[in-house]
Image: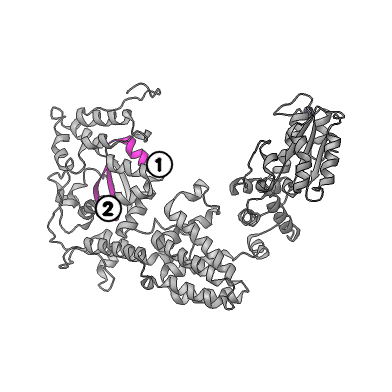
Amino acid sequence: RGCGKTTSARILARCLNCVEGPTAAPCGVCRSCVDLARGGPGSIDVIEIDAASHGGVDDARDLRERAFFAPVASRFKIYIVDEAHMVTAAGFNALLKLVEEPPPHAKFIFATTEPEKVIGTIRSRTHHYPFRLVPPRTLSSYLSEICEAEGVQIDQTVLPLVVRAGGGSVRDALSVLDQLLGGAAETGVDYEQAAALLGYTPDTLLDDIMDAFAAGDSSAVFRTIDKVIETGQDPRRFAEDLLRRLRDLVILAAVPTAVEDGILEVSGDQSERLKTQAAGMGSGELTRAAEVIAVGLTEMRGTTAPRLHLELMCARVLLPGADVDERGLHARMDRLERRVGMMGPADAPAEVPAQQQAAPPTRQAAPPAQQAPPTRQQPPPEPEPERPVPQAEDPTAPRPMRRPAGDPPRQRPAGAPPSSDASPAAPSSTPPPTPAPTPAPPTSTPGKLGTAEMRRAWPTVLEEVKRRRRFTYMLLSQHAQVQDVQEGMLVLGFANAGARDNFGSGGSHDILVDAIIETLGVELRIQGVVANEELAQRGQRSPGAAPEPPPASMPDRDPEPPPEPEYAEMSDDDEEFDGGTNAEELLGREFGAEIISVDEDPEEPT
Ligand SMILES: [Zn+2]
């Protein structure tokens, strides 16, 4: 419905009957083209039949008789039978002979929404072209074009509402738009007006309740429900819109670039808000909440007390402890285990690692923060370097993860140069001036929780990354390793600049951030550095010993990801990991080679 079947049939007729034709590009100037153009008088040889009103056997017989007369002015006599499924069985039978052996000048185009209702003998003698609903993005830009052409002021945030109301049908969307414009003031259509006219739940209410869910603030949840009722919203509609919002968040949690990719149709500032909400709840909780609401919605149908149901539903979302199904338990146990594993023996919290302090509280603090300025981005505020200072002074501050100063360094110090203990002080005040030479020190410094824990948890993080995106997993598992974690900053050493740049672009960065949040419950900034560059530079500084430095530090990092299996694991379908990349990497590592220029031709090895 409204996806262009009849319009396409007319265009096809125009193509067939053009003087220049039959052609895919009608000239637009010949008589047939002018007659059949939009707003034209129509051609006498193109007969449109609405089967809804003329689908009887008499109409079919009439058509059959007239079809044998030659066309008046055009090449073909074209019958467009709209709503063909409405033709009666007798009518189809009367047409059958004609469709089976049509006179050479006759063409039939059947348009229908229910092809299965067209009798098989007709169907088997026709070509089929299925039509799909128009994708929201296309429809949205089309509507925007129309508004511009008509000189109508319309808020860009209104268009997604119209598209949603149209349900993929251009005709329906246009009629919704028409209604909105009809009721619009001089200044055009704004969002609140459109949402109210179309009966959608205002986004502010959905934001309120999502923020309250994320914060676990039950009083805010029930106050929002009260507001829903007071403002005259239908509880069922609200639950539906809430489910839709949860769906958006679930997708956003899984595909961080969903807004940019157009998977989600939301406006710019709304996308920031959604991102904050998605990060506040986490994909597991979001999925569970969506399930609870979806089940609740079916129960809500036909109930006499929809508000009660809505409230009970929301109470269930608020109480993850009440959920005893396997998935909920597993998710929660996973998280607990990871946190316990990160804590280590509980003694002497003398040196409280900065990033551990900063991260977990912010994760809990994030949801309330969204309520005030919803457009605020989450990532920047998280691991502020200044944060640890006040928190370290405040003994009442919750410290879910601390690590003792005297924890044995079970992990190997990755490439630790002897100058280790001197450096931690400097980077802690100035975040990452020279990340690569300094990474090792904190590793070997006991009590600095970051690097060792991250190394230990790295396989788990990688598993999570793999679940989200295979490409990022390949990139990280084969080319990157944890060099350092401090001040809420994870420094990743990449085997070459290409791998680092790959990581920086294309959303891999965000996927890793999310994977770390998911597995460890902390949000870290991530910086990619090129490990080999550092080694190469060190080699140049002390000529003569040029090949030496890499091996000197290599043994430390080599055992972790053995280089040989790397290539063996490489799969052919990842074009990023083709022979060229590996050759560069190998040459760089083994011979200290540097890329001077890259040939444009991919066939030529560099
Ligand atoms: Zn023409």
Q: Residues within 10 Å of mark 2 (few under 14, many from 20)?
A: some
The amino acid at mark 1 is: Ser
- The numbered dot on residue 460 is 2
The residue indicated by pointer 1 is 505
Tell me: 410 left or right of 192: left
Residue displayed at 20% across by 27% down? 591
Quadrant of residue 403 in the image?
bottom left
Tell me: 421 left or right of 580: left
Q: Secondary structure at mark 1?
A: loop
Residue displayed at 61% across by 56% down? 164
Q: Residues within 10 Å of mark 1 (few under 14, many from 20)?
A: few
Residue displayed at 67% across by 42% down? 120
Instruction: Decide whether residue 486 is among the magenta residues.
Output: yes
Give the residues drawn in magenta, as a range: 480-504
In percent of width and height, residue 172 lies at 69, 53
Instruction: Decide whether residue 540 is among the magenta residues.
Output: no
